[in-house]
Image (spheres, rainbow, N blue to C red):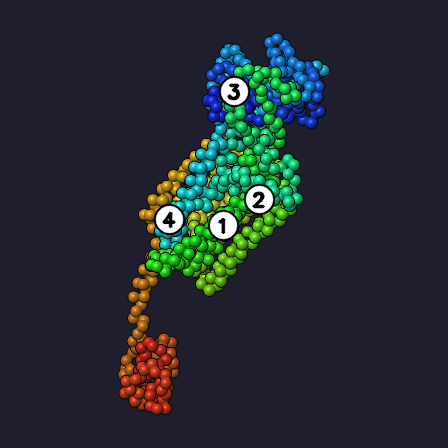
Amino acid sequence: MWRTSAIGLACLALLPSVLGTDILSTSGVSDCANGTSSSITVNNVSISFDKSSDNITFDASGTSTQDQYVTADLVITAYGVQAYQKSFDPCSRDTYVSQLCPVPAGNFSASGTQQIPSSYATLIPSIAYSLPDLDGTAQLTLKNKGGQTVACVQAGVTNGKTVSLPAVSYVAAVIAAGAAAVSLLGAAAAGAHPGSSTSSPGFFEVMWWFQGLAMNGMHSVNYPTIYRSFAKNFAFSTGIINWAGLQNSIDTFRQHTGGNLTDDNYEYLRNTTLVFSDGTTVKTSTSIAKRALSLFVRDVTTSVNSTSSSSTSTTGTTSTSHLVQGIEAYVEQLTVPQANTFMTVLLIFAILLAIIVVGILLFKVILEAWSLFGKFPKSLTTFRKEYWRVLAQTITSLILLLYGVWTLYCIFQFTHGDSWAAKLLAGLTLGSFTLILAFYVWKIWSMVHKLKKLEGNADALYEKKEIWKKYKLFYENYKRGYWWLFVPAIVYMFAKGCVLAAGDGHGMFQTVGQLIIEALMLIVLLWSRPYNRKSGNWINIIIQIVRVISVVCILIFVEELGIAQTTKTITGVVLIAVQSGLTVILALLIAVNSIITCCKENPHRKRRKAAEKHLSQDIEGDAFLMEPNPYTSSPFGPSKKKSDPAQGYEPVRANAYSRFGPRREDSEEGLVKGAAGMGYSGYRSVSHGRSETDGSPPPPFSREPKLPDLAFEQYRHK
């Protein structure tokens, strides 16, 4: 089957997908001479086969140092297997190509269309036209009559179909926006009550999931073409966005701060073919209209030293090739030069930060104006008074959201960047973000230490409103006994970014390191099940299981293991299916949570109400404690020894003293004065301006009821 497919794969072209459903084509061109000095330099080669017409369309351009006769060797590989190999002489009658017989000295270009027998065209299986991101290469080697290689070019294979689609990125962005809306809806429904939590999956969980998908595509391994294209769809979650104006501005910044723009700038990258470690190629920018036109050119055209041999002429486009892997390969597929990576993320972060700050301040101004001309809802009063706290917490949330990928890009800038200013900014921002998160860790741990010392536990983190408003960002979805889990989560994000960036170029180290980190996090989740809701526990555990499975699959792509390309492709398809399936499930759960959030009471709030009800019942049941306990014996009963103070009146008197303060002197003189004082209606007067010297009673010791000093003990022993 590989041999029948090979004939079709040999007829490949440099044409994008939208031009036909049954077209096989090459994508990009690279030099495969491996440093061998070549007398012929090929700048551009494109060959396409159109099944509907059985036509081969080709376009080639290059330069030659001399006139020379050559032979050509064509090798086609599909999914790592050599599917077709043929040697031919351009001057032979059966394989005559006038432009190459002989190869002229100077600049040359040739394009044309030839028809192949239908018997060969029918051998191409239909799957070759429908499978996305066809994984194959076509290599053409030119040799002189002496058998020496004078030129070698290689191009990737595509049928125009790919899983790298803008629509996928838009849908993922919509899912993230939906998660953010549901999280805000849940917060509004809870009314910002202490102990309230949001439903899973929330905005952070969804964004971290998309970031994980993007980071899975940054390993220095031989990805199947289909999975490499799939991982590109989630680059937006890490701050990588293709924006020409932004990239040109970064290039200018680098040029003035020590950067080398010779072969590392946006314009250069736009006309470069990326060559991956497995030999597949991708052209970062193509002219669809120009290549579409070449399909309809039916006359063979030859141009030597800019002189055309027919009325129809084409000019070859100079193309360069660039070997890439790892993080560099990932970002440059999106036309972001690797040296621009950190500055791209920094500027996107700055834009988001500016939008957030302006939005919050603008809303504050609107509320102030509203308060002058009308009465706004009471629920907005807190925001009006504490907008600076809201602003600070929003910025902290953004830092926490991006901390893992920020660590990744900063370390990558340290090791691959060329601008001293960009490296300085990377160090300052990473240090600042780490210090901010470390400050919150210290504050929360200090608060917990203080609470445990005073109250014996840390429940006040969830119960006291002021503490809750300040620090809930880090632990609001965790159970009370697992509030500390946000610290391992921060370490987890930092470790992932460090291992991936520091191990760039070493796929085995990256993958094994990531597998250890993901497995440890899974163990922590299975052991603690820390989320307040059962749904949160199961969703996050399932997400972590898929992360571990994903890294195991990436381990299959490691070059050192020597796994067959067909196995890698099947693994890539399975991995796409699993990750896409989980993404769809998360989207459905977000829709379900939007309904549940409006109907189901938050468990933290429910427990708080139950505690308040229980407290009110206790207060009502203990209301009699506001009055003194009755005497345990009658004052006129049997006499008791004075040496037994634990009997009779003494316990009651001690209890009364502990509740109502010190007593007046317990003596006959005190009894007379007390009886006389009872005649004054002002005994409970709150006036503090009068004293006992003018006959007025002293101010009360307490507002609570107090027993009169009857001095029963003296009467009983007389």
- Number of residue marks: 4
- Name the residue tied to disc 4: 185
**How far apart are labels 2 and 3 at the CA level?**
40 Å
Circle 1 — which element? helix
Circles 1, 2 touching at the beta carbon (< 8 Å): no
Circle 4 — which element? helix
Q: Residue furthest front?
A: 311
Query: Which of disc 2 and disc 4 is earlier in sequence?
Result: 4
Identified at 61% across, 37% down, the residue is 265
Q: Residue 275: give x, y in percent of width and height.
A: 60, 29
- Name the residue tied to disc 2: 343
Q: Nearer the viewer, mark 4 or mark 2?
A: 2
**How far apart are labels 1 and 4 at the CA level?**
24 Å
Query: Which of disc 4 and disc 1 is earlier in sequence?
Result: 4
Q: Is residue 288 visible?
A: yes
* Image mark for residue 295: 3
Query: Which of disc 1 and disc 3 is earlier in sequence?
Result: 3
Q: Nearer the viewer, mark 4 or mark 3?
A: 3
Say which amino acid is labelled 3: Leu
Identified at 55% across, 31% down, the residue is 285
Instruction: Using the image as rendered, state which of residue 448 and residue 191 is in the foreground.
Output: 191
